[in-house]
Structure formats: structure tokens, C-alpha cells
Amino acid sequence: MRTVDLIQRKRASEELSPEEIAFLVNGYTAGEIPDYQMSAFLMAVCFTGMTDREVSAMTESMMNSGGMIDLSGIPGVKVDKHSTGGVGDKTSLISAPIAAAAGVVVPMMSGRALGHTGGTLDKLESIPGFRTDLTPEQFHSQLAEHGLAFIGQTDEVAPADKKMYALRDVTGTVDSIPLIASSIMSKKLAEGMDALVLDVKVGAGAFMKRQVDARRLAALMVGIGRRLDKKVQALITDMNQPLGYAIGNALEVMEVSQTLHNEGPEDLRRLSVELASRMIFLGKVTKTLEEARELAEKKLSDGSAYKKFKQVVELQGGNSQALEKFELLPNATGMREVTTSRAGFVSGINAEDIGRASTLMGAGRDRKEDAVDPAVGVILEVKMGEKVDAGAVLCRLYYTQESTLDEAAEMVEDAFKISGQKPDERALILEVVS
Ligand code: URA
């Protein structure tokens, strides 16, 4: 088998066999297939897609690229949650502790920033000392004792996704339904979960711009789970404007802490509670979804979820004081306000532009080996539907380098639409696929 032949066949829209897909995934994981050939293959997939049989084969090869974590010795249903990628989307850091505080065992294997979207691992690592590189044994014992642990793909578990995810991030090969589905499902299956709640984002700030594509992605992942006897539920949720007000790693951790203290933005709270409720329900802690919602609300409002998050931050080496004293988090060195010259209603905030501006300032990567700047990002001052006067501040950019600031500010200015008419309210949770 020659890699170049497989690339050419994929480029010509031919279906590859499971053996051929395994050859590519295993060869790349072992370092025998170079980045440039894998990049060409991924780009061919972006253009020509994959059949469902190919996506299943890709998912299984990626899942089997390393060891599988066996959590069967831990009592209870193990339930994870994953988002397909959004801007300001920090719900994992809120819904996971709510569900764990309600008694669900939550193994969480997350990713880093991808394209213009943020990543749970990068957000967590902005807490000084926080480590996401737990060994499978540490992951297992933290889950058994405390019911919640956060890790990333490692060289031992889901190594194919670790390498391909980093490559896709910098080669423009992220927004492809088969690549997203196999990336998410391979690592979730390898981490040993029994059930999964997916947040499939749709809209300007999501990889899926159209609801029909989001629905297809959701159905594909639910189907992969079902074939392997896992319960998977997907919510399709709006990502036309950023979620909450904060975009950027440390800035988002601050908003997570505020939300866990019951002082966060309404949209972020609502979605996090709904995701946690479904985790609680799939975890069989309650008999009905309604009871799960009540329990999730209670665990958030009585401070149990915050206590759980703080405990996990400490267990993973993080300085939990930074969750209350924000000056202990990485801080930007400068701030620039973006204002409107027009009075009216905020009728659009293009989340992709805001995400790109934040990435440009350093919150995401240009090359695989780049480190992210945890301090930078954007804080919105307004959300869609709000009335603004001429001269009002729309958002603030937090930066550490002047070199990209003007370009980022221009992108952010273009992201806001101000019009004479109040826009119709948009639903946040659009559909459930299960
Ligand atoms: N999240 C993932 O884990 N992988 C993707 O490809 C997109 C979002």
C-alpha cells in the first residue's frame, strides 16, 4: 500500500477500505507517514467527504491507536460531555462539576483550541499549576475517588487524535463532518465512558454553519455510539454570537468561576445546566429529565458544583485561589476598547470574527508547536438585542502584544452589526438528537 495512492483515491472521491484507513492512521501515529502526506489526505477528506463506513473505520482506527482506559471497575454510569467547538464555549468547566456534584462519574477527555474556537485544555491550563497530562492510572484513581478528572489525548490514549488534531488546527482541515465525528468519538470511546452528551454548535462561530449539517454531524456521532453500545444524546445549540461575555483562556476561567458562584451570564448558565441535566439523566442518578434539571439547579445554586471544581483544580495541581483572586491568573498587559459610532440595537455579533481576533492576539495557534497566550482575549460589553448609544463600548480587547492588536481590533469592529430594529430573539437550544 502506498500513501500517495490512497491520497489520490480519496481526492477522486473513492471509498477507502477499513484496512486502508487503518494503514493511514497507524502509519501517521507511528511517525512513518509524514505531516505533509497526512495533511494532503485530510484536505482531500475536507473536499470529498467520507462514507459512513469510512467514518466508522476511521473512528475505530483512531480509538485503537493507543490503549483503552477501562473504567468498568468504578461503580455507576460514566458520562462525559463534549462540544464540537465554539467561541466563549466554557460549558464543560461548569456542566462537568455540576454532574459530578450530583453523583455522576465524569471522565473528561478534552481538546485544545482548534481553528477559531477555544479548547478546554488550554482554558484549564491557564489556572497556574493545573496539569492535564495525568497518566491513565492517575485518571482512573481520581475518578474512582472524586468522580471527575480532566485529561487530554496522550501518547498512550487516543494518540492518533492528539497528532491529527494538532495538524488539522494549522492546516485548515477542521471543518469537516467526518473528521470532527471521528476525532470526538475516538477519544471519548478510548477514555472508557458509557454515555455521552454532545453539544453540536451551529452558526457563524461554529464549524457547522447550517442546521442541516449540524444535524448530520449529530446523527453520525449518535450512530457511532449506538453501534458500540454507548448512549449518546446531542443538543444542537446556537453559536451565532459568543456564549457568555468572555472569550480567551484565563478570561473564560473567570467567567466559569462567576457562573459557579451564581453570578454568571444567563445564556451560559442555562446551557451548562441543561447539558449537566442530561448527563445526570444518562448517568441514571434520576428517573426523569425533569428531576435531573432540578438536581442540576440545586447543585449549582447551593455551591456544590463550585466546591467540586475547586477540589479537582487542587487535585490536578492548580492554584484554586486563582478562582477567587483573579489577579493570580495570567493577566494581559494592555486593554483597548472598541466602540460604536452608531446608536441602535446590536443585531449581530459574528462569533467567528471574535474567535479569530482572539486567536490572532495569541489565544490560539498558528503552528503546531506554538504555545497559547493564556491572558489575552475579548470581553463583550453587550449581547445581541441590546440597545446602544453612539460612542458606547461594545467590547474590550485584552492583549500582551501590540503587533497584532490593530488587525484584531478591526476584525472585532466588523463583527458587530448595529441596526435600527430590535432583532428577533434566537433560541439557544435548537434541537435534540438521540
Ligand atoms: N472537538 C474535537 O475534539 N475534535 C474536533 O474535530 C472538533 C471539536
Image (cartoon, helix red, strand yellow):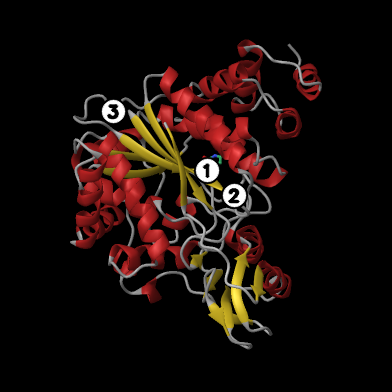
Say what amino acid the circle numbered 3 marks.
Leu
Q: Which residue is mark 2?
A: 206
Q: CA distance from mark 2 to mark 1?
A: 8 Å
Instruction: From the top left corner, tell me how far across and down residue 310 is, in percent.
Output: 26, 59
The mark nearer the N terminus, 2 or 1, is 1
SS under mark 3: loop
What is the number of the mark on residue 345?
Answer: none
Pointer 2 with pointer 1, Cβ within 8 A? yes
In the image, residue 213 sits, relative to residue 316, either above or below, namely: above
Q: Residue at x 55, y 32 (%)?
A: 181
Query: Whole-percent x and y of residue 70?
Result: 31, 25
Q: Quadrant of the N terminus?
A: top right
Which residue is more in the foreground, 89 or 334? 89
Q: Amino acid at mark 2?
A: Ala
Q: Residues within 10 Å of mark 2 (few under 14, many from 20)?
A: many
Residues packed near mark 1 inside 10 Å, few (<14), some (14 to 19) or many (20 plus):
many
Query: Where in the figure is residue 212, as x and y percent of width and height?
Result: 60, 38
Dot 3: few (<14), some (14–19), or many (≥20) neighbours within 10 Å? many
Q: Is mark 1 within 8 Å of ligand 1?
A: yes
Find the distance from the CA under tag 3 to the CA under tag 2.
32 Å
Assess whether mark 1 and mark 3 are in contact (beta carbons under 8 angstroms). no
Residue occupied by mark 1: 84
Q: Which residue type carries mark 1?
A: Thr
Q: Residue at x 48, y 23 (%)?
A: 224
Q: Dot 1: what SS?
A: loop
Please give the residue where the numbered disc 3 appears in the rendered image. Answer: 71
Q: CA distance from mark 3 to mark 1?
A: 24 Å
